[in-house]
Amino acid sequence: MMRYKTYLLYNKVLTLLCLVCLSATVSAQYVPKDKRKKTPAKDSVTTKKETPPQKSEKKQNPKKDNDIGRRWVFGGNFWVQFGNVTFIDIAPTIGYKLTRNLIAGVGIGYVYARSRLATNLGNLDVENQIYSGRTFLQYIINTEALFGEGNRLFLYSEYEVLRSDYYDRVLDRQNSIWVRRPQIGGGIQQKLGNLYVNLLVLYNLNYLEDITPYPNPITIRLGFNVGL
């Protein structure tokens, strides 16, 4: 009986010691929330790279715009002749460089012609004022190595339409008619400062002596160009 009591006492003491040790261990591991250190996980932290904002509008190329502006060519030509036939030809033009050497363009013209014709009633002075429109192609040949800097040859073709007054010898009266003048030729350019002076010779492929205001099928023009 005595041994049994001693055994029970021993078990109680052992159980009490185990509880005390367990309680001390738990209290030693406890850390208040406000004092806990937060250590972010390496896997959860990601660094975002800043990407520069993309511009929706593309910048215009000023060089390209300037190239387009430099393709325009302005100029004109004129010719004056006095004598039995008085002839004044003035024609401003505007062209566009299709390539470095090829220019296409349009122009308008004014012609004043006065001539003396022999009729059944005697000599008759005929005056004619003409307005015309034309298209042209000009091809520049690089011949500066041959003729010197600023001197170039060129080929030229033109199609002109004009309304001309002419004297009908059969009906013995003055009539009006549309005249079409396809012309081909060429000339030489000489550079003077910022412009080129042109000397152009053309041949009319559809020359009709009785109805055209021009005295012969060959036309000589002196002109200039800016922008070449």
Image (cartoon, grey):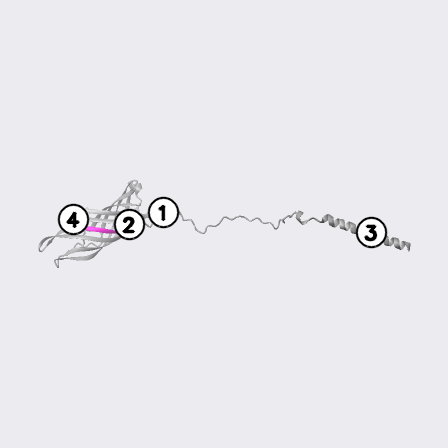
Ranked by sequence position, the earlier of labels 4 and 2 is 4
Contact? badges 1 and 4 (CB < 8 Å): no
- Position of the N terminus by quadrant: bottom right
What residue did someone put label 1 on?
Answer: 67
**Which stretch is magenta?**
107-114
What residue did someone put label 2 on?
Answer: 94
Asked whether residue 159 appears in the rendered view, the answer is: no
Residue 3, image x, y percentages: 90, 54
Please identify the quarter of the rendering in which residue 226 is found.
top left
Secondary structure mostly seen in the magenta stretch:
strand
Kindly report the distance in space between the C-alpha atoms of the residues bearing marks 3 and 4: 145 Å
- Residue lying farthest to the right in this orientation: 1
Of badges 3 and 4, the one in the foreground is 3
Kindly report the distance in space between the C-alpha atoms of the residues bearing marks 1 and 2: 17 Å
| Secondary structure type for disc 2 | strand
Pick the residue in front: 96 or 153.
96
Left-right relation of 78 to 122: right
Residue 124, image x, y percentages: 11, 53
What residue did someone put label 4 on?
Answer: 86
Residue 7, image x, y percentages: 87, 54
Ranked by sequence position, the earlier of labels 3 and 4 is 3
Tag of residue 195: none
Crowding around mark 3 (Cα neighbors within 10 Å: few <14, some 14 to 19, many 20+) is few
Kindly report the distance in space between the C-alpha atoms of the residues bearing marks 3 and 2: 118 Å
Ranked by sequence position, the earlier of labels 1 and 3 is 3
What residue did someone put label 3 on?
Answer: 14
Query: Is 111 a magenta residue?
Result: yes
Left-right relation of 123 to 67: left
Residue 181, image x, y percentages: 23, 54
